[in-house]
Image (spheres, helix red, strand yellow):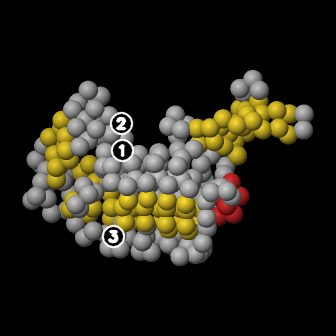
Amino acid sequence: CSNVRSLALATGLKNIGDFAFSDMVLIEGVTIPETVAFMGDNPFTNCVNLTNLVLDSANEAFIMDDRGAILDKTGYTLIYYPVYKTEATYVIPETVYEIAGGAFSGSQLQSVVIPETIKAIPVSAFRNSRKLESVVIGNDVTLEKYAFNMDKDHAFIVKNYDEGDEKYFYYEFASALSSLTIGDNAKIGENAFAESTYYDVNGYQQYSKNQFTTVENVRMFYNKTVHFSAV
């Protein structure tokens, strides 16, 4: 299906599973029929050319906001934010209480404000959002693993590392993130922001260092650029 550019889903289709059309990078148009009543985690992950996503106006399970994001009919769950949109900022509505896994994966957002109503940022929610510079997160939030992670094939920096007589190099996943505000009582999952993997001089992996498992880990790693304060 890698060469498909347009997809009209058949009337009668009821369920679209997790990441159903992920990595269909050439697809430009999808029509979601009125009969679809369930969508799993972001079905259109990494569909970078999907500029014409149409939700049948008769569909009673989902709505599309003015930015092209798909939410359930109540506005309670945000399922998909369009990758191709170039607007710099998105303030998630306070009517949203849940973000689906991968919902903002690969987005071009530079700034996002996550309201107090959202208490969990799921797996890969903002993964590979390379332009993201500023994130505001409320109190009592759990950030699940890989929530803001960057895959190494998207961006990485190689640095030298010396420990006594041992010499290593490592890569760290990089992003534009320069301002991060997290409220009180945050819980940060494994590799929520990044992962560093150490190698010896011959390129053999020695061990992985799982960064950012606590707020203090993130503060130490980003001590020159990222700010933590209660909101």
> Does residue 181 appear left or right of residue 9 in this picture?
right
Q: What amino acid is found at the position of numbered circle 3 in the picture?
A: Pro
In the image, 207 versus 106, the foreground residue is: 106
Category of crowding for the residue at label 1, using alpha-carbon neighbours closer than 10 angstroms: few (below 14), some (14–19), many (at least 20): many
Element type where label 3 sits in the image: loop
Please report contact status of discs 3 and 2: CB closer than 8 Å, yes or no.
no
Q: Position of residue 202 (x, y in %)?
A: 75, 23
Category of crowding for the residue at label 2, using alpha-carbon neighbours closer than 10 angstroms: few (below 14), some (14–19), many (at least 20): some
Category of crowding for the residue at label 3, using alpha-carbon neighbours closer than 10 angstroms: few (below 14), some (14–19), many (at least 20): some
- Rendered image: mark on residue 25: none
Q: Position of residue 127 (x, y in %)?
A: 47, 48
Establish if 221 lies above or below 98.
above
Q: What amino acid is found at the position of numbered circle 1 in the picture?
A: Thr
> Does residue 11 appear left or right of residue 107 in this picture?
left
Q: Position of residue 126 (x, y in %)?
A: 45, 53
Give me the C-alpha separation between circle 3 and circle 2.
28 Å
Instruction: For marks 3 and 2, give the one nearer the viewer.
Output: 3
Please report contact status of discs 1 and 2: CB closer than 8 Å, yes or no.
yes
- Rendered image: mark on residue 45: 1
Element type where label 1 sits in the image: loop
Residue under the image location 16 percent in, 49 percent down: 54
> Does residue 130 appear left or right of residue 91 in this picture?
right
First in sequence, mark 3 or 2: give its number. 2
Establish if 27 lies above or below 60.
above
- Rendered image: mark on residue 23: 2
Element type where label 2 sits in the image: loop
Instruction: For marks 3 and 1, give the one nearer the viewer.
Output: 3
**In the rendered image, which quarter contains the N terminus?**
top left
Circle 3 residue: 93
> Does residue 36 appear left or right of residue 213 in this picture?
left
First in sequence, mark 1 or 2: give its number. 2
